[in-house]
Amino acid sequence: MKNSDLFTLMLQSCTTAVLAHALDPAIPWVWVVRHAPKRELGWWRAPMPLSASGRAHDVTVRSVEFDLLLPTSRFLELLPEFLDHGITLFQMSRPVPETLSLMRLPDDVIDRVLVQNGLHLGFHLPHAVETAQFRAPRRETLERLLTIPEIAALALTGIE
């Protein structure tokens, strides 16, 4: 690792479809951070639980946002649901601890905490068809991505 930072790879005109090629099926977990099922601000009807132990109720909501922790295989099954969204996700070698929240961490320690908790690959896409960034603690992880034609075709830079 260089100066305790993660290695990065930038992609142009990207969508979440690239994740079908990038995620390693041998790495068991995908953590999606702050997923918002409705991209635009506005009210919408949705079945939502009102407590952790309650059933879902048909309610009108807005600004719904949550983290998801899924087995990699399940995330890949659900990937079509994310195709027109931006996303921040981390592929992890172990489940994310109950109390780990990136929003509670200072920016200068996030990378170190992710690595300590099993980070294999990070991906950030602000919104569909935008510049995206892969991040990884091991250069070899990003070098492998560049051997995949669907990813290499989108690469803006080399590995930094």
Image (cartoon, grey):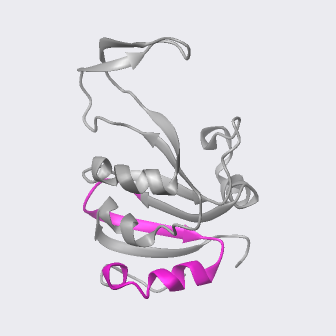
Q: Is residue 79 above or below residue 158?
A: above
Residue 42 image offset from top left, x and y in percent: 24, 25
Q: Position of residue 2 (x, y in %)?
A: 70, 79
Q: Specify the quadrant of the image occupied by residue 17.
A: bottom left
Report if residue 21 lies within the magenta region.
no
Q: Position of residue 101 (x, y in %)?
A: 64, 39
Q: Residue at x 71, y 78 (%)?
A: 1
> Does 159 appear above or below 65?
below
Near-viewer residue (56 or 16): 56
Query: Is residue 140 highlighted in magenta?
Result: yes
Expressed as whole percent of the image width and height from the top left, the position of residue 134 reads 48, 69
Q: Is residue 88 left or right of residue 101?
A: left
Marks counted in the figure total 0
Quarter the C terminus occupies: bottom right
Q: Which residue is depicted at the point 36% across and 79% down? A: 151
Residue at point 47%, 67% (across, down):
23
Question: Residue 59 lies in what quarter of the image?
Answer: top left
Q: Which residues are magenta?
A: 125-152
Please say if 49 is above or below 127.
above
Relative to 34, is 58 on the left or the right? left
Q: Is residue 106 left or right of residue 66?
A: right
